[in-house]
Image (cartoon, grey):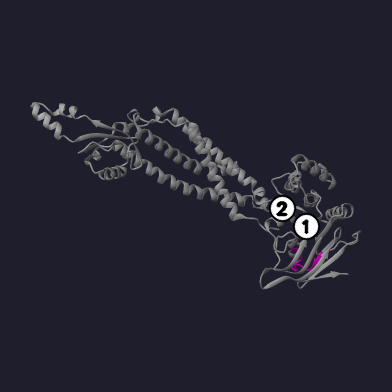
Amino acid sequence: MKSVKNIFSFVIPLCVMLITFSMYIFTQEIIANYKTKISDDYSIVLITNTPLIKDDIKSLAGIDVKKIVTLEKDEIIQKVKGSLSENSVSLLKQRLPFFYTLHLETFPTSSQLDVIKEELSKISNIHKIEIFSKDHNKIFSLLVLNQNIIVVFFAISLLFSIILFSKQIQIWFYEHEEKIAIMQLHGASILYSASMVISHALIGAFIAFLIVSSLLYFIFNNLALIFPPELNSVIQLDASLNVEFAYLFILSMAISITTIIGVLFKYKIRKYG
Amino acid sequence: MIKAKEIYLAYDENRFIIKKGNFQIKPCEFVFIGGASGSGKSTLLRSFYGAILLKHGQLIVDGQDISSPSNRTLRSVRKNIGVIFQDYKLVKEWTIEENIMLPLKINGYSNDISRQQAIKLLSHVKLSHREGFYPSQLSGGEQQRVAVARALAHNPKIIIADEPTGNLDDSSADLVWNLLKNANEQLGITIVVVTHRVPKNFGIAFRQLSIEDGIIYEVC
């Protein structure tokens, strides 16, 4: 009973940390999907004096340019000609600059937009750039903000969890101190003599992984139950659960093993007798 | 087997417990180390398995210099000696067979072989009827016999015992002395025992060292 209680005092902070990590992965996935979705609807308008050499613009602010579409002058004139005479239309056609819409592979952040504008301004024949920064997607900004909050929360929970794990592992060491000392007196290595402490920590890490994985599996299969229908267009998860589980398993074991090594390093061999 | 050359032992720099110790213990010898309480006999014994390190000098145990040993050397020395303590130092959560199996498992023997050897040794120390018991279920004398069995388990070349009969009544003490004498006579194990009282009519040849004011000398 005491041993179960001990293991759970290790499992709970680890679960909190893994849940935060899952939330981070979730948000990252949602943002990636949402970015792709809105990037299809988003474009930058460029106005040039002379025709643009499209091949010169392959990427902007590290984002690949998906396509540059030339807006046909005839179409533009068609929309505005109204009661203009044939001569005026012909003159307008001659004077009208070249219009292009530039589509990106992924949706840019606000800071990337600033860089894009700066890079485009350096191209001499472009004399007007419209990035529609005011319309820059507000949901996307909220998602990014959310992700950043989760990253901070994850970092804090990681720090506190490691402190709690190392305290718990030290408690286990004190509980087994006599046994460890007797084993070391007979020539056991620190790893061998602390094997019960190590197994406690690894069992704890595995239990935490199982709990959080089950929770994740439930959430993935019941998104409609958890999130309101209004968010259906935003929350789309394509990620493979197996990959998420692998991340959780690796993180759970890595944190436990790193903490054990840290505590063992402090403990070292006792010249006990 | 054990060779000390100009050894100095101290818990702090200012007060040496053992000063300029020179002695040699040869294979198959039975050696008692005596002296008054606080004379440093247990401290000297602890230095044989590296529980206290020398301040100066050289100490060789079973061919290995443990004057300032690495962890690897220390483990190697400890693996090859048997140790017996006044307070038995048995693991309470383990059965007595599991306690006897400990040095065997540390030396890499399989669980099955270790268990077979432990059961054989339980019979040797006349505790077969206690198989499966925990140390707390045994008397002091019985626990010390388990400790002797554990010290013998991996066929060590040396057994070091610190007041092995200090907590025992006379009949239990006799049983423990007989086990140690048999180990020395029949198995050729070198035995070094710290005691403040050398048993009378011991029955086998032994040497006696004594410590007084930090000086080790041979008792004739």
Disc 2 residue type? Answer: Gly
Asked if the residue under mark 2 is in contact with the one under mark 1, i.e. CB atoms within 8 Å, the reply is: no
Number of disc labels: 2
Q: Per the image, is A18 magenta?
A: no
**Residue A187, which numbered label?**
2
Mark in front: 1 vs 2: 2
Q: Which span is picked out in magenta?
A: B33-42
Between B168 and A242, the residue placed more toward the observer is A242
Residue under pointer 1: B167
Q: On what subunit does the disc labeled 2 rest?
A: A
Between B17 and A189, the residue placed more toward the observer is A189
| Image location (x, y in percent) of residue A40 | 31, 31
Q: Quadrant of residue A30?
A: top left
Do the residues indicated by labels 1 and 2 lie within the same chain of the protein? no
Q: Quadrant of residue A199?
A: top right
| Image location (x, y in percent) of residue A90 | 12, 29
A135 left or right, relative to A25: left
